[in-house]
Amino acid sequence: MLLQQFADFLSLITIGMCFILKIPQILNLLTAKSANQISIVSLLLELTSYTVMTSYNFTNGYSVLSYLEYPIILFQEYILIFLVLKYLNKINIFSILVSILYIAISISLAIQLIPKFVLTILAPLCTPISVSSKIIQLLAIIRAKNADTVSPITWFISAFTNLTRVFTIWMDSADILLLGNFVISVILSSSIMFFAIYYKRIKQD
């Protein structure tokens, strides 16, 4: 009982922190008016992972507290992707059509117009997708040897909230797919945070 109450408390903290997860990164972009060192491929992979996991948790009827951060982060991800596309001058007919297709597929998954078993197939892929998105972003920083537009605070919050989710998911459903995804995310988010801090300090010195 006490452990469950603690898990619920961590869920509330996680959800609360996710309200500001992408805000530091968004503010960085607005200030710099540049999307250098930010990988659009990484963001799109993240978007795919968040969308699938939101639908997976929703259609499986899991406790809302155990996944509410996904729709919260999704909203911020939309803003972030828009800004990156804007600063990279990639807002065009193609990107608009892809956005419409994305919305149609997302709704179809959530209301199970697309059969639920599709999500069961897609959910395990979210771990490699999430890993790939973070590795691509990490490589973008390392190759540029610069992290001016990357927010270490965003990646700290990401690592912390993923860590709390390891415990809350274990308490709520012990879903191996979800647990594996969060453990790996903790490691990679922390790596991006440390490299961002490292290159910022090198530039300052």
Image (cartoon, rainbow, N blue to C red):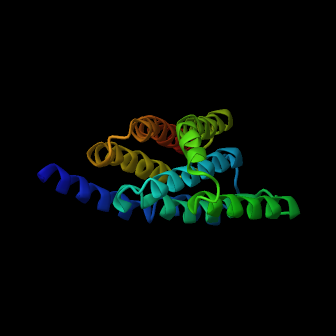
- Foreground of the two, 204 or 69: 69
Q: Residue furthest right?
A: 93
Q: Give the residue at x 44% y 65%.
A: 19
Q: Give the residue at x 50% y 62%.
A: 71
Quadrant of residue 190 within the rendered picture? top left
Q: Residue furthest left?
A: 2
Task: Give coordinates of residue 86: x percent, y percent.
Answer: 76, 63
Task: Give coordinates of residue 44: x percent, y percent.
Answer: 67, 50
Q: Give the residue at x 60% y 45%.
A: 118
Q: Give the residue at x 36% y 48%.
A: 160
Rendered position, 160 above or below 69: above
Q: Is residue 38 visible?
A: no
Q: Is residue 9 visible?
A: yes
Q: How many marks?
A: 0
Q: Is residue 178 left or right of residue 11?
A: right
Task: Give coordinates of residue 42: x percent, y percent.
Answer: 65, 44
Task: Give coordinates of residue 181: x percent, y percent.
Answer: 46, 38
